[in-house]
Amino acid sequence: MTRVAVVGATGYAGAELVRILAGHPQVELTALTSRQYAGVPFSRVFPAFETLVDQACEELDIERLAQRAAVVFTALPHKLPMGIVPRLLDAGLRVIDLSADFRFQDRTLYERHYQPHTAPELLPGAVYGLSEVYTTQIRQSRLVGNPGCYPTSVLLPLVPLLRAGVVDGQGLIADSKSGVSGAGRAATLTTHFCEVHESFKAYKVGTHRHTPEIEQILSREAGRDIALSFVPHLVPMSRGMLTTLYARLAADADPAAVAACLERAYAGRPFIRLCGSAGRLPDTRYVRGTNCCDIGWRFDSRNRQLVLLSAIDNLVKGAAGQAVQNMNLMLGLDEATGLRPVPGAL
Ligand SMILES: NC(=O)c1ccc[n+]([C@@H]2O[C@H](COP(=O)([O-])OP(=O)(O)OC[C@H]3O[C@@H](n4cnc5c(N)ncnc54)[C@H](OP(=O)(O)O)[C@@H]3O)[C@@H](O)[C@H]2O)c1
């Protein structure tokens, strides 16, 4: 059994980590931290956990935490983890951070879009936790920067095709729609019921901070600078994310190469489900509560436009599920351990 702690356990991503880890056969949950709910049983914060996770939340005390855990998930707002993670690593722990603080290898890129970094020395050694793409590096790492939810949904379909030169990388467009839990649990004007119910809107068009995160990985994998037009939308559902990608097929590529490339890249990977060019289209309902990423595609021969679609649960493959998958890789476990609950029909 590996002793595991969740820092920021009472947020949406943290609570999803607790849900998954409570059912994981190889871990013991030893600490759940929260400022607002310190001393309060987790099951009183989220009654769904009654009799299942009754342990009390506690204030973050890094020294105590280091004595009681071997792996820590930090599920805090950006900026906070960079102040905590160096001390956890110094104490010999492994860390999977769900914020953006360790997703960028280039400090200036992070600082351009977020804030000054106080632990830049850790950035070159941190591994970007896109489980199916950086598997080998994740297995050997002590610090994983878990990807954002939008980047996961964009990168999983695109990376193998760009790497193989099946799409040409020019004029890439990603149109993504997210459930409201993607914005976290804290109440805000833009995410309260009356603002989102019966409504559908784009936001941060061309300016969302996930754009540089996605472009960093696309450029690394293509071996040249790749620009992406990224348009996120908020949809009135609590969880789920659907991304529609528009890419030009490379001049010498055949549409059949799309299937061949994706099948090769994801052979044997339990959480990538390829829906193909003629089967069902990805639907957020079919990945709800699961760590799956469903990928489908259509080819419009009139303009050589490839349309790729991906569906994930933003809180699972987009956050907590992928984080646990990364922990499994770091611990040498089967990557699917604890992540195989069968989804419901609705
Ligand atoms: N939501 C998603 O779909 C999603 C997807 C991918 C990645 N992420 C990332 O995961 C992280 C958590 O996101 P979330 O959506 O779970 O946010 P959230 O619902 O707002 O939860 C934030 C958590 O951090 C704690 N916290 C807040 N401010 C703190 C502070 N100043 N010091 C210590 N603890 C603090 C909160 O509890 P207390 O206030 O009680 O301390 C809470 O447990 C973020 O970095 C986010 O970008 C989220």
Image (cartoon, grey):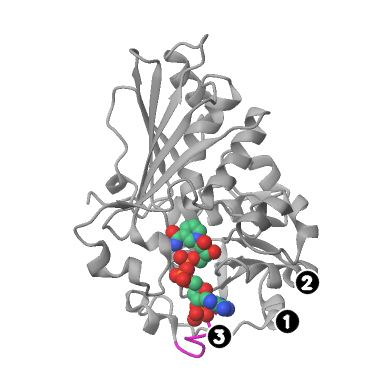
Residue 124, image x, y percentages: 77, 50
Q: Label 3, secondary structure: give it.
A: loop
36 drawn magenta: yes
Q: Label 1, secondary structure: give it.
A: helix
Q: Which residue is mark 3?
A: 58
**Residue 113 occupies quadrant:** bottom right
- The answer to whether mark 1 is within 8 Å of ligand 1 is no
User: CB atoms at circles 3 and 1 under 8 Å apart?
Assistant: no
Q: Which residue is mark 1?
A: 63
Residue 329, image x, y percentages: 62, 49
Q: Which residue is mark 2?
A: 91
Residue at mark 2 to residue at mark 1: CA–CA distance: 8 Å
Q: What's the magenta region?
A: 32-40
Q: Label 2, secondary structure: give it.
A: loop
Query: Against 160, is 88 above or below?
Result: below
Name the residue type under label 2: Ala
User: CB atoms at circles 2 and 1 under 8 Å apart?
Assistant: yes
Pointer 2 or 3: first along the chain: 3
180 drawn magenta: no
Q: Is residue 14 visible to the viewer in this orientation of the structure?
A: no
Picture disc at residue 26: none
